[in-house]
Amino acid sequence: MKPLAIDSYTVTSAAGRGRDAHVVALRAELTGLAQRHFEDAELATWIGAVAGLESVRLPRELAAFDCRNNRLAELALGADGFLESVAAARSRCGARRIGVFIGTSTSGVRHTELAYRERTDDSLPDWFDYRTTQNTYSIADYTRARLGLEGVAVAVSAACASSAKVFASAARAIESGFCDAAVVGGVDTLCLTTLYGFNSLQLVSSEICRPADPGRKGLSIGEAGGFALLTPAPRAGVPACLGCGESSDAHHMSQPRPDGAGAVLAMRAALGTLDPAHVSYINLHGTATPANDASEDAAVSALFGTATPCSSTKGWTGHTLGAAGIVEAAVCLLAMEQGFMPRSLNTREKDPALKANVLLSAQQARVDYALSNSFGFGGTNCSVLLGPAP
Amino acid sequence: MTGACVIRSVGIAAPGLVGWAAAAPVLAGTAPYLVAPDSPYAPALLPPNERRRATASVKLAFRAAEDAVTAAGADARELASVFSSSDADMAVLHRICDALAKTPRVISPTDFHNSVHNAASGYWSIGVGSMAPTTTVSAYDASFTAGLIEAVALARDRAADVLLVVYDAIAPQPLAAKRPLAATAGVALIIGADSSAAQGAVGRLTLALDGSVETPCANPAFEALRAANPALRALPLLELIAARRAGAVTLRGTGSLLVSLAYAP
């Protein structure tokens, strides 16, 4: 792909609202995860909840979109001057020429769960509006409308790779002339579907998640939202998305391919012509399930050897599912800005079966090129390469 | 401001339009439109284990996809793919939300992995053994247009053929009352990059993000069907292809966009 400038970006997760809050949390090693229940869920686990969603109000004209997921979008869009950056781009390009590509896995399913509790005589309550809340496109339509955009808009819903794949879709749409710039992002919120669903697969940890630790017991689930504004004019001093690689495992609906061959294809495609030795830091998918850690480790060590520093930052945010791609792309951008590589938080020691250089302590070091991995159910893989403008 | 592509083949599974070979003369007006009772579909490209786990919605996507792949004589392993669905699997959504409203809350692990919007795309890559990129999009009633844009851009990016599958199934109650689709339907296209040879293809398509009025079906008998399912918003285009008649249609896009499609056989 042709490099795209990342003119503006923002992230909101359990670790905080906005980029500065994430820098503070990453440097101080303060997790956003807490051992508590989500609403009336009864599972003994840790969750990464975003504070303050209950009091978020959507603009009056978009009130029909009100649900936890769109509230998180609203909260995230309001940080780091992102609304203003998009407004300026809209003035330059026109509302029809900025595309919107938003990743989500469960969109507004929390709203539907609540509606089912009020189900009577096989009908759902009047307040339940399917199109603006539950439907997968709702989050993309909300973002589009909130930003005053009128062009191509789509929700990308490929499980936990969703908001990494938005970079690829946006790049293709710009290259093909369907838009001149793009807002990409991802939003996913806590709900019973994912908590009880991952629990049914015995993948939810009763302890805080410990990626790459021999004593890991699985995921901590989190919620997050993040956005980036992409334009086709990379320039010095502005970070760029340099590549985005997609592949399929062709193996299993909910288990990664053990040899990591699908992940290797995605990472190689993201690198393009860049020598893997030039990658300073890899933000791992690193969910803290044994199957993910083993598969990703096989892939990373096959392509990069065992020296490239890497870590999972899910110890701060939890696994934010469809938002993980944009959250971890933002972490890579912060690492480049700060000259700082976060450790694998909550990891007490590295599983001796893993070969990659998983950081057990933070490193102050220049980060030129950073790669972020996101993999999902259905065996879908995506890697995003970030770095300086060429 | 245009995209262009080659259309290699079409697949369809809709009421009275089952398989492109049979549907094309109906859409071209040379055969009568008859809706016969449908029987469950067993995807040829899904191994028995996966066939047991796959839902009706996944099988619907396979039905349209297999029709297009067979017609083009394509090697499914080599195709990148775009799956576009407004609602994905409402039957699974219903079962999960129903289970979560009861005590104790017990979700089937198979339902959970089938609940992802990219379930059909996942089963497809497993079934055909393809490690090529596949993506899954949603744009509510504009899901055909959005999927087409994604597929045209992907074909151009890879300079290779791409399978586009657009599908949605009627939801069970109580969801159907909130999202009333009058038909279950899937439409598939195999799309080649504009620069590729059009030998054996069904035509060329040029897209432009303009147009002022959505085009209805040429045959008024199909108008209700067009409105019945997001995938069937493609019908005005499919009427042109079926008749091998050059022309242009305008489909609704996202936001205030209208997308015009110029077809040449």
Image: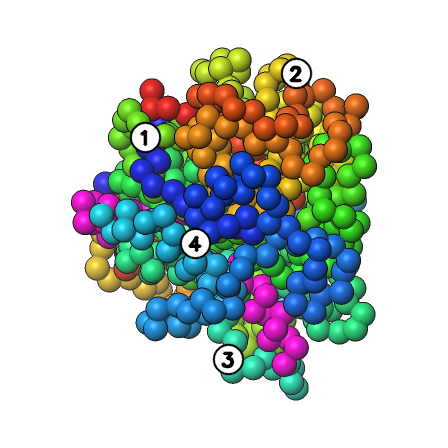
Give the mark nearest the N terminus, 1 or 3: 3
Position of the C terminus of chain A, as image quadrant, is: top left
SS label for mark 3: loop
The residue that mark 2 highlights is A306
Question: In which chain is the residue bearing label 4?
Answer: A
Label 2 is placed on what type of residue? Thr
Compare marks 3 and 4 and give the one earlier in the sequence: 4
Distance (Cα) linking label 2 and label 1: 30 Å
Mark 4: which secondary structure? helix
Residues at circles 3 and 2 in contact by the CB criterion of under 8 Å: no
- Eyeballing the image, is B249 above or below B101? above
Q: Residue furthest bottom?
A: A121
Residue B227 as seen in the image, left or right of residue A238: right
Can the viewer see residue A244 in this picture? no
Which residue does the numbered mark 3 point to in the structure image?
A: A127
Amino acid type at image mark 3: Trp
Q: How many marks?
A: 4
Q: How far apart are labels 4 and 2 at the CA level?
A: 36 Å
Of A115 and A18, which appears nearest the observer? A18
First along the sequence among labels 3 and 2: 3
Return the chain for callout 1.
Answer: A
Residue interval drawn in magenta: A89-118
Give the residue at mark 4.
A76
N-terminal-most mark, 1 or 4: 4
* Disc 1/disc 3 C-alpha distance (Å): 44 Å
- Looking at the image, which is closer to me, A235 or A343? A343
Q: Quadrant of the N terminus of chain A?
A: top left
Residue B111 drawn at (x, y percent): 72, 57
Question: Which mark is drawn over residue A238?
Answer: 1
Taking the magenta stretch, the answer to whether it contains residue A92 is yes
The amino acid beneath tag 1 is Val
| Marked residue nearer the N-terminal end (4 or 2) | 4
